[in-house]
Amino acid sequence: MFFNPTYLLLLIPAIGVAWLAHWRIRVILRETSDVAARSGASGADAAAAVLESAGVNGVYVEDATGQQLDHYSPAEKGLQLRPEIYSGRTLAAVGIAAHETGHALQDADGHPLLAARTAIVLSATCGSLIGLILLIGGFLLVERFLVYAGIVVFTATVLSQLFNLVIEFDASRRARHHLLASGVITADEEPAVRRVMQAAACTYLAATLTSIPTAYHYLVKPRRPAAAGRLDAVIDRTPGRAKA
């Protein structure tokens, strides 16, 4: 056999960590998406309040329709929020918006690792998918090097995202203080919002899982109809087979 399946054990911890993050985010957001903030603040209001409380100016908050993830861009000094977060008045919307605003606070303070976060976010978006494409492509083409390369790239991507958690949790810590100080949330709402912000910090790690069905769609699924077509051709050539 060209490949030792035991090497796949290297992927199990990486996939397990990503799956745990994915599951945790779903649970927390389900619990807080229907709970309205007592202050009536929307995600956009929460972001503006955090910026004002921290004394950070020159950062715009934008309703980014069609965007899949909420994001702060250091280059543009802009906070881009999905419509449900920008206009949402739930604890989930407030927590997610505040977490992303925390990156604007890091930028204003010159956080030394914020630049590294941009590269890590790109790796989270592309690296996991590339790794799985190499892995699955290696199996389909019976190519040992591609399989090993896929395992290395996918695992390295998850490890880089674990490093990124340090930056993400720091952003949540900074913003949470200003949420309370500005009155956007009350003290008894703070535990739920803290959990939302922790979930938001794990977003890019959990996004690794989305690369699995994407890799399947582009590599495995197209080959299945082709294989079925070849099987039909063999059957049609079988001696004695009656034609319709």
Image (cartoon, rainbow, N blue to C red):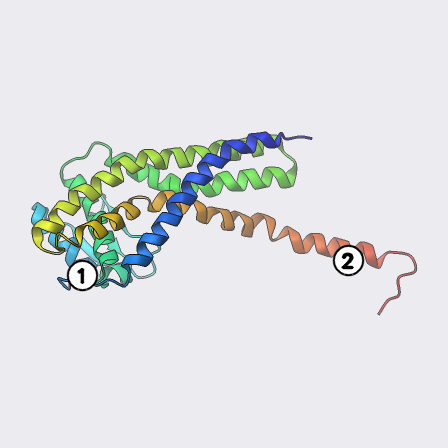
Task: Please give left or right for residue 69 compared with residue 213 in the image.
Answer: left
Amino acid, disc 2: Asp
Q: Quadrant of residue 201?
A: top left
Percent coordinates x, y for residue 216 in the rendering: 55, 49
Q: Residue furthest front?
A: 188
Q: In this rendered view, identify the residue nearer to me: 215 or 40.
A: 40
Percent coordinates x, y for residue 77 in the rendering: 19, 47
Residue contact at pointers 1 and 2, CB within 8 angstroms: no
| Residue drawn at the location 19% of the way across and 48% of the way down | 101
Task: Please give left or right for residue 53 compared with residue 75 in the image.
Answer: left
Q: In this rendered view, identify the residue nearer to me: 210 or 196.
A: 196
Percent coordinates x, y for residue 209 in the rendering: 45, 46
| Residue drawn at the location 83% of the way across and 59% of the way down | 236
Amino acid, disc 1: Ala
Task: Please give left or right for residue 38 compared with residue 237 in the image.
Answer: left
- In the image, which disc is placed on residue 37? 1
Percent coordinates x, y for residue 140 in the rendering: 64, 41
Label 1 or label 2, whichever comes before in sequence order: 1
- In the image, which disc is placed on residue 232? 2
